[in-house]
Image (cartoon, helix red, strand yellow):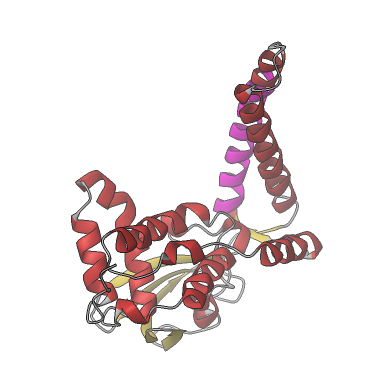
């Protein structure tokens, strides 16, 4: 087997991977792959990436959102590409999974913890999601009934698929109903002068690139919608900071530095 190029950087490997995709695929994948690259360092040799670091990245994403799967899948595809192209000597994608014990512990913490504090916008969005899930559930219940009419249960794939979907829907419905039982905050819980739960913040990095995020409870977090958890590394760094202050986030690739430009309640 050919040895991996020890000089190839993670950034160069990601560039190769993204250029191999169609424009449509690239648009879906690019943000999460670049997040992974920034975290570990663009210039870091790909050969120095270790399995524990890949596993830690999965845990970090899981801590910032309730549904880490869609955010981890593009990174998994990238790591599989790296192995198939012999850019790495081992399959790093195999380590991009959540530990079962960690998942159970997280589930216990969510059950035992007090109800979350949601923004007004988040609560309204959750109510719409709940209504959509309840409507979908009615259709899936009918699918289960229809599939049960097939007397050959040995290979009744439609029945198993419908049951699995129903279980997933019930879990999501319970989760949203629990979240909606918490507090609803209409504005920044600290003040308009400091970043807090519900704040809409604008930050910039050393290259001048800016981004806008809303600080929310973990149950409301969605990177795709610009909502970051107050328990995530960046969210924790921004909490209680004032406009004009600099913040740092520790990452394996080095310290990521940002400036808090504006705060809107």
Please report the bounds of the magenta region as a residue range. 121-142
Q: In this view, does 65 lie to the left or right of 77?
A: right
- Left or right position of 81 against 169: left
The residue at the point 56 percent across, 54 percent down is: 67
- Taking the view exactly as shown, the residue that stands out farthest to the front is 1
Residue lying furthest right in this view? 112
- Name the foreground residue: 1 vs 201: 1
Decide if residue 65 is in sight here.
Answer: yes
Residue occupying image coordinates x 60% and y 76%: 190
Name the spot of residue 76 as percent of width and height, x first.
Answer: 41, 58
Residue 152: % across, % down: 69, 15
Residue, x 27% and y 51% (percent of image)? Answer: 27
Q: Main secondary structure of the magenta part?
A: helix
Q: Does the magenta stretch include residue 24?
A: no
As displayed, is residue 11 above or below residue 129?
below
Q: Name the quarter where the N terminus is drawn.
A: bottom left
The number of discs equals 0
Q: In this view, does 92 lie above or below 145?
A: below
**Can residue 195 be spotted in the picture?**
no
Where does residue 228 sit, x and y in percent of width and height?
50, 65
Q: Position of residue 112 (x, y in %)?
A: 81, 63
Q: In which quarter of the image is residue 13?
A: bottom left
Residue placed most toward the observer, 143 or 154 = 154
Left-right relation of 163 to 55? right
Tell whether position 129 is magenta.
Answer: yes
């Amino acid at each position: 087997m050919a040895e991996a190029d020890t000089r190839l950087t993670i950034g160069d490997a990601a560039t190769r991977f993204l250029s191999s995709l169609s424009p449509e695929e690239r648009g879906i994948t690019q943000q999460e792959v670049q997040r992974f690259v920034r975290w570990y360092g663009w210039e870091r040799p790909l050969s120095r990436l270790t399995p524990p670091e890949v596993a830690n990245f999965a845990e970090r994403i899981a801590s910032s959102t309730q549904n880490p799967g869609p955010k981890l899948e593009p990174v998994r595809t990238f790591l599989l590409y790296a192995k198939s192209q012999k850019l790495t000597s081992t399959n790093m994608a195999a380590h991009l999974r959540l530990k079962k014990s960690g998942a159970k512990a997280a589930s216990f913490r969510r059950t035992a913890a007090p109800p979350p504090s949601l923004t007004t916008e988040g609560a309204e969005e959750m109510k719409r999601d709940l209504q959509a899930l309840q409507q979908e559930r009615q259709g899936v219940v009918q699918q289960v009934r229809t599939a049960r009419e097939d007397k050959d249960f040995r290979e009744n794939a439609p029945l198993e698929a419908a049951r699995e979907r129903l279980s997933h829907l019930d879990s999501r419905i319970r989760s949203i109903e629990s979240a909606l039982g918490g507090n609803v905050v209409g504005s920044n819980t600290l003040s308009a002068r400091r970043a807090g739960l519900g704040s809409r913040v604008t930050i910039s990095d050393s290259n001048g690139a800016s981004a806008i995020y809303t600080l929310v409870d973990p149950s409301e977090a969605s990177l795709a919608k610009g909502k970051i958890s107050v328990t995530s590394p960046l969210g924790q760094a921004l909490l209680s900071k004032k406009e004009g202050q600099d913040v740092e986030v520790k990452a394996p690739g080095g310290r990521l530095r940002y400036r808090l430009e504006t705060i809107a309640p």
